[in-house]
């Protein structure tokens, strides 16, 4: 067990909140405070309705909150009173100026560094939890150690690898914890201090260390590799549709090779989420900055295939539905970027809805957890959109169902009853290959899976 520590996290988002709740839960002798500039978010963390949905998170927070886990807007006091500071603010893609659409927007990051400098009265360990371009720690160090007043900062990189929807499990049983530091005496000591915290529940052999640049880069590369697998199988799904092959069968055969592995080979309407797109673009931008054009082009193709896959889904719908969607009612099953989360950031469903509206279709959005976010994402969209939580009611009177998120509940619906209430011919476009396609066909649907021959009654 480690000695008692006072830990702060700046940024109470999808990473900051759950990660600190896990540390508080596993280190009851440590005091953990999470601060944010957004008072509404902090109020939600202090309420019974947490700002994010994650299986198991409510219980985790409830057990530690008020004991050794605190949520606050007092950033100044947080910085002054704590010795170990995680920084988990957002690092979106830059939307303006040089590098717009590609580079990371580091304004929140730099503001935080300046706040830490302004309010610190003693030396601290500052930990990069956010995903950042390689060499960000250098800028951080330069800002933090720009004053000669006896206060010294060690900067560590400790990227987070949790996935939404499984955050609690991923935090409790991580594949690895990565800690990068300067290889100075003080850097190595700071590295060990952080390792000791994780060692309260993570086996030592899973806590790996590296130089700080390798750590920063490993996070971008891990996401790029994961996304690359999805783009690879999605590219293959297009070929399967032409060649009468079945992408699920191909993925199974390929994934059984232990060198390749079975995970992340599910063909889909494309990857979404707040990170894959932004992190790959960030990697591409870095490569271009270093003059590595071929390397940049290679990684950029992962994003291009992802865009292509989303557009392909719409074109397949159009082609199947007699080249017009105008005036047709299309029901979307799922709006979150993946199952078990309310997060809709960069969800392919946003693209699909906008394209359907462009084609003058009427869209009925259904999702068990993400309707609030869907409403915000689609606010101001021209066209007819309605929101119905119940997937059965949402499909009533529709010409087609497009399944966009792999929520388990869609496997267990009474499809026969749903078919009865729909316009005919009724279509299902399964963007996740979740349903029993043969059964849907037997009920009467025209079924368009991904990367498999369609089952149609024409
Ligand atoms: P988020 O947008 O949910 O949370 C970031 C929080 O930081 C917001 O609540 C925002 O108000 C706050 N913030 C911004 N500037 C601040 C400041 N100056 N002071 C205090 N608070 C401030 O983002 P997130 O999804 O938690 O991601 C955070 C970082 O972690 C990103 O770099 C992301 O790439 C990385 N990451 C995210 C995930 C994920 O699953 N979401 C997983 C691994 C890594
Ligand atoms: C991803 C990584 O998995 C995490 O390790 C990482 O920490 C995180 O990004 C991050 O840096 O933010 P996340 O985006 O939450 O996590 O979720 P994933 O499970 O990776 O799914 C991402 C997208 O890929 C989803 O839209 C999902 O539906 C899609 N996907 C995933 C597929 O289309 N096929 C697959 O086989 C797997």
Image (cartoon, rainbow, N blue to C red):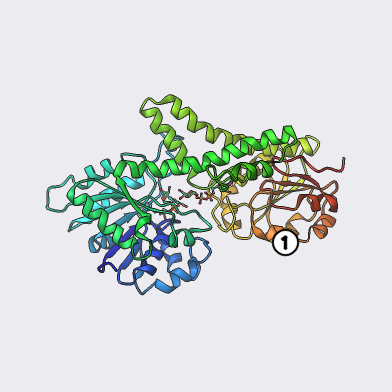
Residue 57 lies, in percent from the top left, at: 48, 66
The residue lying furthest to the right in this view is 458
Q: Is residue 86 visible?
A: yes
Name the one closer to the observer, 360 or 83: 83
In-front residue for pair 451/317: 451
Q: Is mark 1 within 8 Å of ligand 2?
A: no
Percent x, y for residue 200?
34, 65
Residue located 30% across and 52% down the image: 127
The residue positioned 62% from the left and 52% from the top of the image is: 335
Crowd rating for badge 1 (residues with CA inside 10 Å; few <14, some 14–19, many 20+): few
Task: Report the quarter where the C terminus lies.
Answer: top right
Q: Percent from the top left, x then y, of residue 105?
A: 39, 41
Tell me if residue 58 comes above or below residue 125 in the rendering: below
* 165 relative to 62 in the view: left or right: right
Q: Quadrant of the N terminus?
A: bottom left
Residue 98 lies, in percent from the top left, at 39, 31
Most foreground residue, 374 or 203: 203
88 versus 299 height, above or below = below
Q: Residue at x 25, y 68 (%)?
A: 3
Q: Nearer the viewer, residue 413 or 81?
A: 413
Q: Is residue 127 above or below residue 99?
A: below
Relative to 426, is 52 on the left or the right? left
Q: Secondary structure at mark 1?
A: helix
Q: Is residue 178 left or right of residue 414?
A: left
- According to the image, label 1 marks what residue? 412
The vertical placement of 204 against 303, above or below, is below
Say whether residue 268 is visible.
Answer: no
């Amino acid at each position: 067990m480690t000695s008692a520590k006072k830990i702060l996290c700046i940024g109470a988002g999808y990473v900051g909140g759950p990660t600190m709740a896990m540390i508080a839960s596993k280190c009851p002798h440590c005091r953990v405070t999470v601060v944010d500039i957004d008072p509404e978010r902090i109020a939600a963390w202090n309420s019974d309705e947490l700002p994010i949905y994650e299986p198991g998170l409510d219980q985790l927070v409830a057990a530690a909150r008020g004991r050794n886990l605190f949520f606050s807007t007092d950033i100044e006091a947080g910085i002054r009173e704590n010795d170990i500071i995680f920084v988990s603010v957002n690092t979106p893609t830059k939307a303006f100026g040089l590098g717009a659409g590609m580079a990371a927007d580091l304004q929140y990051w730099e503001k935080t560094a300046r706040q830490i400098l302004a309010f610190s009265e003693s030396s601290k360990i500052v930990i990069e939890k956010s995903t950042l371009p390689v060499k960000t720690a250098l800028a951080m160090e330069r800002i933090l150690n720009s004053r000669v007043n006896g206060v010294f900062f060690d900067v560590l990189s400790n990227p987070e690898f949790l996935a939404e929807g499984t955050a609690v499990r991923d935090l409790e049983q991580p594949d690895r914890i990565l800690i990068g530091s300067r290889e100075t005496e003080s850097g190595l000591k700071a590295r060990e201090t952080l390792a000791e915290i994780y060692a309260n529940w993570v086996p030592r052999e899973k806590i790996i260390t590296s130089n700080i640049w390798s750590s920063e880069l490993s996070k971008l590369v891990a996401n790029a590799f994961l996304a690359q697998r999805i783009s690879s199988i999605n590219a293959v799904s297009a070929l399967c549709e032409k060649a009468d092959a079945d992408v699920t069968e191909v993925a199974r055969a390929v994934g059984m090779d232990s060198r390749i592995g079975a995970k992340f080979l599910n063909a889909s309407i494309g990857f979404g989420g707040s990170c894959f797109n932004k992190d790959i673009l960030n990697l591409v931008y870095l490569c271009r900055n270093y003059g590595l054009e071929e390397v940049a082009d290679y990684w950029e193709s992962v994003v291009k295939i992802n865009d292509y896959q989303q557009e392909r889904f719409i074109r397949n719908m159009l082609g199947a539905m007699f080249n017009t969607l105008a005036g047709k009612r299309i029901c979307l099953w799922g709006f979150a970027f993946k199952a078990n989360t309310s997060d809709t950031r960069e969800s392919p469903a946003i693209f699909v809805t906008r394209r359907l509206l462009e084609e003058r279709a009427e869209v009925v959005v259904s999702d068990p957890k993400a309707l609030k976010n869907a409403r915000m994402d689609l606010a101001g969209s021209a066209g007819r959109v309605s929101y119905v939580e119940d997937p059965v009611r949402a499909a009533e009177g529709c010409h087609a169902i497009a399944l966009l998120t792999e929520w388990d509940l869609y496997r267990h619906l009474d499809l026969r009853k749903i078919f009865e209430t729909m316009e005919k011919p009724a279509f299902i476009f399964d963007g996740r290959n979740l349903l029993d396609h043969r059964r849907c066909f037997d009920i009467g649907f025209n079924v368009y899976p991904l990367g498999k021959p369609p089952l149609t009654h024409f």
